[in-house]
Amino acid sequence: MVALRWLTQTALASVATMFLAACPGTLGDEQVATPNLSLATSLTSKIASTIHNGEKNSLVVNAKNNDDQVLLIERIRAYLVDPEDHERVIRTLEPARFTTKVHATGEANLAYRFVPYLDHERVTLIVNVEFADKAGNKFSKTAYKETVSIVEPPTFGFDPQLWSIYLMFGVVALGLGYWAADLFGGSKPQKPKNPALAALDDARGVSGESADDWVPSHHQAPLTKKTKSAKKKSS
């Protein structure tokens, strides 16, 4: 008896499952229609269909509500996938969260920024917008799906951001060079002579006088007497 009841319940469950699968939207499982939201996306890069590797890229999604209810934009998700196989995700980009309400017949511009780090030349960029209706039902719609080229950033041998460091090293090198030249650069400069003494030295050189000829005789006398007394003592 118990086995028969179990078989009956199992059969009824199977029939109900088949009925629901054949007739969706019945027995309380009503399907929700996707709101009419139009999406148009444009990259802000100067060259069409290109993104810059290792740099900040941006795009703008224009969301236009063609429905008769308010829609809430909640999130933008973006992926970089293989151009030959869209199921192969190369990079999942950072999502952006929104709390933007788009009223009936209204529209909103949604800015999204991302920085890719890739070693590929071409990828397919997929941008999805997630939104909800007034009842809280969630939806996702693709706003952009195109193959783009990867542009490598330019390389500089002299980084402008390091100018201050280069300038500091230049000042230090210049100071060390001046210090070394002052320390090992030969004899030190002599102080200039007094003009009167220089003229006197020139006059002596012309006349042939000795260095003591200009001393007055009364200053030279004690020196002469002292010399004579020294001779008497020695004798």
Image (cartoon, rainbow, N blue to C red):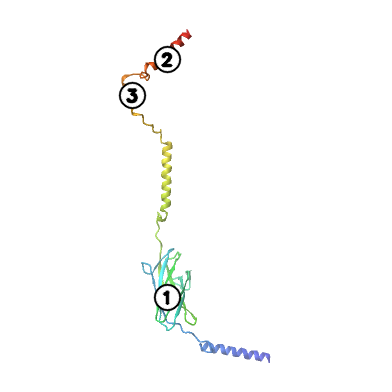
| Mark 1: amino acid | Ala
Q: Residue 222 shows which numbered tag? A: 2
Give the residue number, with chain letter if any, for mark 1. 143
| x, y percent for residue 216 | 37, 18
Give the spatial CA distance, label 1 vs label 2: 119 Å
Give the spatial CA distance, label 2 vs label 3: 26 Å
Give the spatial CA distance, label 1 vs label 3: 101 Å
| x, y percent for residue 122 | 42, 68
**What secondary structure is marked by label 2?**
helix
In this view, 217 is above or below 194: above
Classed neighbour count for the residue bearing mark 3: other residues with Cα under 10 Å, few (<14), some (14–19), many (≥20): few
In this view, 7 is above or below 117: below
Q: Nearer the viewer, residue 164 or 81?
A: 164
Give the residue number, with chain letter if any, for mark 3. 200
Classed neighbour count for the residue bearing mark 1: other residues with Cα under 10 Å, few (<14), some (14–19), many (≥20): many
| x, y percent for residue 2 | 68, 90
